Image (cartoon, rainbow, N blue to C red):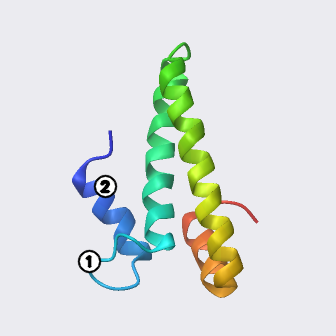
């Protein structure tokens, strides 16, 4: 589970302005943090198929946000990918 402090730290790196939680950058940052924590959980509990399904949904959701951001603002997309250490 993502604590309030971890969520705030993830948001601070990518927010467009104070209080921003709805921008694609902020949502990708929070999703990435949740994905990392859930992946760690699944390494310990490899038979937890319900959580695995949730993980796959979050990965798909993050991919959609990244695809949208890449189409709308390539510069912001590249900056986000570098900041979060995702791909490319």
Residue at 41% from the left image edge and 84% from the top image edge: 16
Residue 23 percent coordinates (x, y): 44, 74
User: What is the spatial separation of the Cα atoms under label 1 and label 2, in whole angstroms?
Assistant: 15 Å
- The one nearer the camera, 67 or 43, is 67
Residue 62 percent coordinates (x, y): 57, 56
Q: Report which quarter residue 13 is drawn in.
A: bottom left
Q: Is residue 85 at least partly visible in the picture?
A: no
Exactly how many numbered labels are in the figure?
Answer: 2
Q: Is residue 50 above or below residue 76?
A: above
What secondary structure is found at the residue carrying circle 1? loop
Residue picked out by circle 2: 6
Sequence-first tag of 1 and 2: 2
Residue at 28% from the left image edge and 64% from the top image edge: 8
Residue picked out by circle 1: 19
Q: Is residue 72 left or right of residue 84?
A: right
Q: Report which quarter residue 66 is drawn in.
A: bottom right
Residue 4 percent coordinates (x, y): 23, 54
Q: Is residue 37 above or below residue 17?
A: above
Residue at 56% from the left image edge and 17% from the top image edge: 46
Q: Kindly identify which numbered label has been placed on residue 81.
A: none
Q: Is residue 42 above or below residue 66?
A: above
Quadrant the C terminus occupies? bottom right
Q: Report which quarter residue 10 is drawn in.
A: bottom left
**Residue found at the far right of this picture:** 88
């Amino acid at each position: 589970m993502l604590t309030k402090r971890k969520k705030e730290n993830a948001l601070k790196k990518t927010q467009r302005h104070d209080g921003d939680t709805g921008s694609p950058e902020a949502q990708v940052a929070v999703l990435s943090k949740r994905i990392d924590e859930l992946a760690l959980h699944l390494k310990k509990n490899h038979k937890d198929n319900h959580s695995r399904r949730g993980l796959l949904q979050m990965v798909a959701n993050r991919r959609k946000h990244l695809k949208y951001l890449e189409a709308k603002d390539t510069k912001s997309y590249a900056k986000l990918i570098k900041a979060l250490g995702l791909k490319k």
